[in-house]
Image (spheres, rainbow, N blue to C red):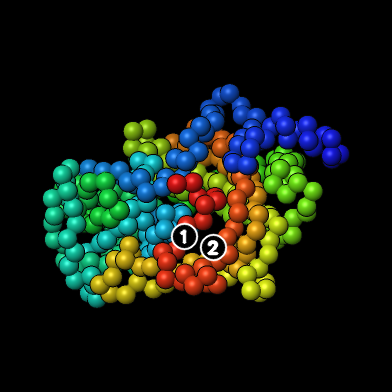
Amino acid sequence: MSPSFARLMLAIMVVGATASPLLSVPVPSAGSATITDRKGYIPFRRHVPLPGKIVGVLVRDAQPVLTLEGRSGPADQMCLGYGGGSYRWVYVPVKQNPMIGSLMLGVGDKGERKRFDNLSMASSTTIGQWDVKGKYALVEIEVNDGLGSPAMDAFVATRMRRMDGTREFPFKLEEVIEDLRKKYEQQVKDQVRQIDTAMEMAAAEALKDRKATGPRDRVEVMFVTWIPETERLRVHFRTAIMDGDYKYSGGVNVELGPRTMALRPGVRPGDLQQPSLPNGLRQGKQFGIEFGNAYEVSKSGKVEKTLTLPIESFQRELQAPQLFNGGARNSPRTMAVPARP
């Protein structure tokens, strides 16, 4: 790409140093739409109230989405996806070795407090009492003894019944989600030329005549929810590709991964404080692009609608990590990109 052509393209398609639309992937008219609410594409601390009995999705790999909200839980947790709201922590009653002896939670529309005894987090082990297995499950749940829950981050599933694979919901959820992963990955491969062009333009805008130092990172988040009004499964994929002109604090070129934390008995997931250096020891100018697709699936397992999150650029300055600023006791920060609170 010549410098004059790059400047022309940037003048037309890139505005300012903040995130701005770069390229929109063409979307077929039938059964498709374009996402306009980028902030709400992956919900951020947006919980919805629950009636006394619901159908929802249990998700075992919810932590990447929880991390965007600054929340942490045990590795084997299963969270609830319902109504497009943020994932809910799910407690279940157990007969032996409860993690929590008793817990007061808000119930009903007004959030009156009710005590629940002998609880553990929903996991592949604890939900086995209802013969619910697997990484994903569509389930009917009795919420807080049938009293429902206000818009908060946790509730107790006092009864549960698997729904996918039944006559009413004949699809098998794990197979559907795996097929959607493959479908999305193929669509990303089909867009490789547009993605490369968008990254070139984002680099030129962010770094001018400098070259990126790398490494180039790809971060992908999947969000799964059940929409009760339409009785459809919705699966969102969002990809961020990032590069930059990086230096390393203290001259130490080390990439630090996230820590895992165990949940101790009597400690709620929201009580965990997880030290985080989401960018390792990097500092400097970072740029990248973000895009995605969401799929709505009927009770029969058919993809009824595709929602496109157009390619959009971003850039930001990575500050020196708190490790070298004497600020280790400060609250951990949530990565600004790809999270969009």
Q: Is 140 left or right of 106, judged from the image as shown?
A: right
Image quarter of the N terminus: top right
Q: Are marks 1 and 2 in contact (CB under 8 Å)?
A: yes
The residues tagged by marks 1 and 2 sit, at their Cα atoms, a distance apart of: 8 Å
Q: Secondary structure at mark 1?
A: loop
Identify the residue at image location x=22%, y=64%. Answer: 93
Tag 2: amino acid:
Pro
Give how far across and how far down residue 235 sits, in percent: 48, 44
- What's the amino acid at mark 1? Arg
**Which disc, if any, is residue 333?**
1
Residue situated in front as seen by the camera: 303 or 10:
10
Q: Is residue 146 visible?
A: no
Residue at the image position 51 percent from the left and 32 percent from the top: 36
Query: Looking at this view, is 158 or 203 the one in front?
Result: 203
Asked where in the image residue 310 lies, by quadrant, the reply is: top right
Q: Residue at x 54, y 50 (%)?
A: 338
Dot 2 corresponds to which residue?
Answer: 278
